[in-house]
Image: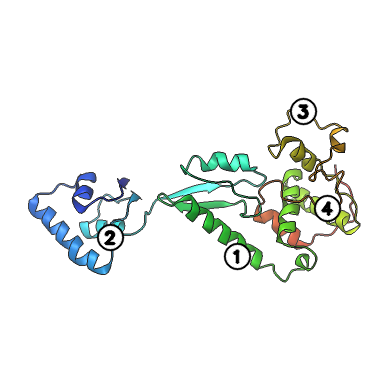
Amino acid sequence: LIIIKKGYTVSDVIETVNLKTNNLDEFIYKFYYLFFNILNNKFIHYGDFFIGKKVSFIQFMDIITKPSNVLNKITIVEGWTQYDFQNELSKHFENFSEVEYTEILADTYYFKKNETFDQFISKLKKFKKKYISQYENSIFFQTYNTDDLLIIGSLIEKEGLDYQDKKNISSVIMNRLNKNMKLQIDATVLYALTSGSFNLNRKITFNDLKIDNPFNTYKINGLPPKPICFVGSKTLNIIMEDYKTEYLFYF
């Protein structure tokens, strides 16, 4: 693994990778770079690069005149809060901003070491847009919109334990919405009480269920105004399956 800093020249690169060269070799390397790379608009990139033990100088120059071949990975876990995501982002980016639950989907993403936060988030937004586009003609979108989908998904993420559990909960939520029943989901009360951190450090009481808050589904009719966590595509797939039961309650 080598690190090439912004503004490095061929001489800097030769010194960084500790190439055993004499003056003639260094002249040949610079000549190759100038006449074969720059003429083809191939310039040295900065960032981290994996270099094999047995590569020629030509192969080496081909690698470092392309974007970094080192990938980092960020996994956004289904049900994560913005606090969780910001904590993970801080491990990879010096500068980043808050990302709304409606903007991206929980998943595993790869990015180049020298990518900016804006470049990274842009890819995540495109991934979400592409995912949603495949369901544009689904039954769900005849009644609801994309924000509704993510809100319902977030409720399922916070309430469900496994795949079958989430399928049943999804059916309950849709059944109650269709009957104009209050959803009465504890996770929304917890969200309201903790301003979205979910760190209450005690059990929810009956008095908690009475608080006036736009996210308290024991008080409001229909869906809360926004999602309460990040949602994964697997959970959204469950909603799109339109799984049917006659259940109106779950425990």
Sequence-earlier tag: 4 or 2: 2
Q: Position of residue 45 (x, y in %)?
A: 32, 55
Q: Which residue is mark 3?
A: 202
Q: Position of residue 30 (x, y in %)?
A: 16, 57
Task: Give the CA separation, mark 4 to mark 3.
Answer: 26 Å
Q: How many callouts does the rendering have?
A: 4
Mark 3, Cα crowd under 10 Å, few <14 / some 14-19 / many 20+, is few
Q: Position of residue 119 (x, y in %)?
A: 48, 55
Q: Are marks 3 and 2 in contact (CB under 8 Å)?
A: no
Q: Nearer the viewer, mark 4 or mark 2?
A: 2
Q: Tell me the quarter of the picture where residue 40 sits.
A: bottom left
Q: Which residue is mark 4?
A: 173
Sequence-earlier tag: 4 or 3: 4
Sequence-earlier tag: 4 or 1: 1
Sequence-earlier tag: 2 or 1: 2
Q: Which residue is mark 1?
A: 130
Q: Amino acid at mark 2?
A: Phe
Q: Are marks 4 and 3 in contact (CB under 8 Å)?
A: no
Q: Pick out the residue farthest to the bottom.
A: 137
Question: Measuring 22% from the left and 52% from the top, which residue is drawn there?
Answer: 9
Q: Amino acid at mark 4?
A: Ile
Question: Measuring 60% from the left and 40% from the top, which residue is drawn there?
Answer: 84
Q: Secondary structure beneath disc 3?
A: loop
Left or right: 235 as drawn, with respect to 222 = left
